[in-house]
Amino acid sequence: MSNKIVGIDLGTTNSLLSIVEGGEPTVIPSAEGDYLFPSVVGFSKTGERLVGAVAKRQAISNPERTVISIKRFMGTDHKVRIDDKEYTPQEISAMVLQKIKADAEAYLGFTVEKAVITVPAYFNDSERQATKDAGTIAGLEVVRIINEPTASSMAYGFDKLDSTENILVWDLGGGTFDVSILEIGGGVFEVKATAGNMRLGGDDWDQRIMDWLVDEFKKAHGIDLRTDRVAMQRIKEAAENAKIQLSFETTTKINLPFIAADASGPKHLDLELSRGRFQELTADLIEKTAEPAMRAMEDSGLGIHDINRVILVGGSTRMPAVQDKVRVLFGKEPCREIDPDKVVAMGAGIQGAILAGEVKDIVLLDVTSLSLGIETVGGVFTKLIERNTQIPCSKSRIFTTAADGQTVVEVHVLQGERELASHNKSLGRFELRNIPPAPRGVPQIEVTFEIDANGIVNVSAKDLATGNRQKITIQSPTNLSQDEIDRMVKEAAIYAEEDAKRREESQTRNKANIEIDTAERTLRELAERIPLEQQRKLRDCIDRLRMSLQTYDTEKIRQDTKSLTDTMFAISTDAYLSTGTGKVAGQEKGGIELTGVSSEEPSEEDLFGWFQK
Ligand code: ADP
Ligand code: MG
């Protein structure tokens, strides 16, 4: 037990946890020893639940039962179906959070109970609420939800600046791009504007390399790899690795032996990609970053020369072309002293320390990203809170009836910038009844909007004559009720124990299954090159491992996996050496991101909600 409040960056691709120790934010490693926790959940065929690196690693042999990028679905009614059970995005995210919590506790030696969790600045109310619920389900008290760009600015310590400065945060992650402009001075962080593209991120750069690889391979061999899922998984992993290499090197080799086969024998993919060619292939993606950046500039009312600093956040900002684009757009060298992977989590950790009372004197102010209001006569949208208003805030306005003798009014709450209610996003509605009958225009109904520090909206309507009052906390139909949350918390707690017991066992089983797959592939593809004697030996190893998988004897599975791996390695090295490349088959073992989450994306309206900090 500790009063510490940790910070968690719950990312689309990766999540991280940070805690302030001795005044400095530290990022806590996972049980696997990496500070990045892949935001991936897998369900094995035997019912085990796998989270993080283990889940990412088994994705290759288990794509239909692996969930990635669940953050895209937060706050929507999307469900993940595995066998006969359905999971909400909150539950899947809770599994990621639970794993992070458990690993951090093991590392720190005390129970982690309270957390600050970050969300993108454009997350709307239901997305924020869903994130909070995910924390609750995972057994965390979510003390505060804060915006990622605010966290990044805190990590850079810009609260200690002598003068007021305008900071632009440029966050390019795995699947999303966010730009935020903050005014910081005297310990106050004010978000002036935000914009972004929810469908632009490192994955798009990977996809371009994948397309190029597949096209080149087709040109050379006449085989279309797109239909071969296993091959595409290997290509995806190789593409991401190549991209990462090209951030440091000017050329990279992509080598995928035995990627396909035809009558003439096995085919290998062996290509070289230069940084120049890669940048040509992705030039339009870089261009796409300019539009949201300029939109945020416009909304902030600032000129390029008013921006004092630009911070780079997110793994994809390691690409030199991204840094060049920022230099050209803003005419200055961007800040990238803090690891772009860790900066958000570190800021969340600092915010946690502030809320725990360990650090004082910093106030956080955020703004709404969309206007909020209600529907009035004729379907007109009447704003109460203008976009970019600082939160927390509260605004009231008096409305009246439209018809004689009207005793009921419906308060329809919306967010957006359009004139007509139907063009904006509906957040919820409620009725205020029992208004004393009177001629139209006489009753006075006071409508109040309140946004708290977490960006959660409360709307109330009060009949000033009778004092009757009705209110709602904005919850989209996709939000969870307290009962549902309670149930999920219980379920999660049960699973936490089981998971700990099963983790080791499932890792071993997964590894065994992957090795069997690889061995069988090797047998299929290298059949003509492996002496019969060795083929039989390999089959024996496979059979023995299959048998021990049925016994659930973890130690035996481990031993038999090892002898299979050793046998296979010896055989495939021999076989491959005879082709002269010196590489071994079965390189598809690494983790690959593929997903069972394939249904429709959130609609365009969902992209930019009003928000807070
Ligand atoms: P998110 O915030 O969406 O969880 P991250 O900030 O963790 O994402 O960024 C993940 C993305 O960063 C991935 O697409 C990954 O390939 C990319 N990435 C990580 N390191 C590098 C690098 N050195 N060069 C280019 N891209 C990188
Ligand atoms: Mg991120």
Image (spheres, rainbow, N blue to C red):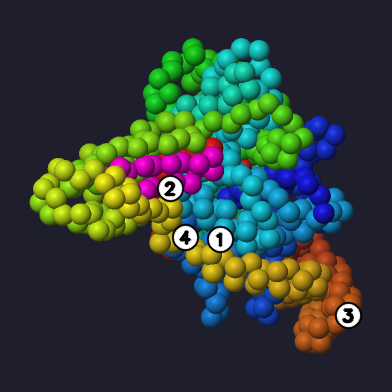
Q: Nearer the viewer, mark 4 or mark 3?
A: 4
Task: Confirm whether the magenta stretch covers residue 521.
Answer: no
Q: CA distance from mark 4 to mark 3?
A: 46 Å
Q: Nearer the viewer, mark 4 or mark 1?
A: 4
Q: CA distance from mark 1 to mark 3?
A: 37 Å
Q: Position of residue 53 (x, y in %)?
A: 72, 58
Q: Which mark is residue 458?
A: 2
Question: Type of residue at label 3?
Answer: Lys
Q: Which residue is mark 1?
A: 90
Q: In the rendered structure, which disc, 1 or 2, sits on the residue that comes first in sequence? A: 1
Q: CA distance from mark 2 to mark 3?
A: 58 Å
Instruction: For the residues labelled 4 and 3, say whether their Cβ atoms are less than 8 Å apart.
Output: no
Q: CA distance from mark 2 to mark 4?
A: 15 Å
Please give the name of the residue rendered at 81% of the width and 32% of the height, measured from the top-left corner: 23
Q: Nearer the viewer, mark 2 or mark 3?
A: 2
Q: Which mark is residue 479?
A: 4
Q: In the rendered structure, which disc, 4 or 1, sits on the residue that comes first in sequence? A: 1
